[in-house]
Image (cartoon, grey):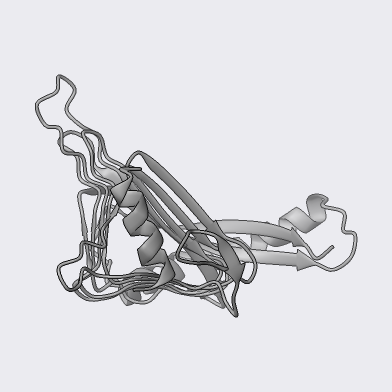
Amino acid sequence: SNDFTTLNQKLNEGQFNSERIIRLRGKDKLDASGALVADVNGDVLIEANSNGVDNTVKAHTFRLTADNGKIDVLGSIDASGEQGGVITLSARDDVTLHGGSVLDAHATASQTPSGSRGGRVELVTSAGSIDMQKQAAIDVSGSTLGGHVLLRAPITASDVNIAPIAGTIKGASDVTVEAVKVYQYQTDTLIDSSLMSAWQSELSTFMDTANIDAIKTRLGKTSDAAFHVVPGLEVQSAQ
């Protein structure tokens, strides 16, 4: 098993099931004891169950960040509860839900006076792509209110770096693709009305109706009323 699997098993044994926030910074990784050690990358693999061992991640709120690598999900993350849970997977590089993987943030309560609210799943990459493959599944359903799914990835010319959505998304009242344009400045830069107008003009061109329709078609979501594409803007300083 990999290092994340070993850590996850220890957390499951200790019943740390309410909230887990894990962040791999720089070129570090987790060793078998959960300590950070130097590594050539910061990749994280969430494995499927094997040899009778349950590798499911179990936490009502689960946030995983890989600052210097990618995230691959082959197994399951269970954030379900009476009210929907929260799952956030954020990486510098690719975030991939492989076939058979499950992100479960659905609400289990159905008999409470107000019913239940679905959960939230966020897949985020700052410099890679998002790929939800065939037979991968996301469940954010609730008995009264559906949940939310956010896919946040970089703009690539007139498109966004997200592969066609081949998996299934269940119970979402909205699925939002946030296509992010990053502006990085190497020297001191005054953010004035002229610069903001230039940003707005570029994003307005990207959000042209025909372009958004083409993105929806490529992602396989043309007829999905819950599916939306919105622009994102990020300003970075190299200093």
Identified at 43% across, 69% down, the residue is: 3
Relative to 18, 239 lies left or right: right
Could you tell me residue 38's position as x and y percent?
A: 62, 72
Relative to 64, 116 lies left or right: left
Is 148 located above or below residue 36 in the figure? above
Nearer to us in this view, 223 or 150: 150
Identified at 19% across, 39% down, the residue is: 142
Is 77 located above or below residue 166 in the figure? above
In the displayed orientation, state which residue is furthest to the front.
33
In the displayed orientation, state which residue is furthest to the right.
188
Identified at 25% across, 40% down, the residue is: 118
Identified at 89% across, 65% down, the residue is: 187
Could you tell me residue 43's position as x and y percent?
A: 49, 73
How many numbered discs? 0
Nearer to us in this view, 54 or 61: 54
| Residue 92 seen | yes
| Residue 149 seen | no
In the displayed orientation, state which residue is furthest to the left.
111
Could you tell me residue 123's position as x and y percent?
A: 42, 60
Could you tell me residue 183's position as x and y percent?
A: 71, 65
Figure quadrant of residue 23: bottom right
Relative to 111, 24 lies left or right: right
Rendered-image quadrant of the N terminus: bottom left
Figure quadrant of residue 60: top left
Rendered-image quadrant of the C terminus: bottom right
Figure quadrant of residue 99: bottom left
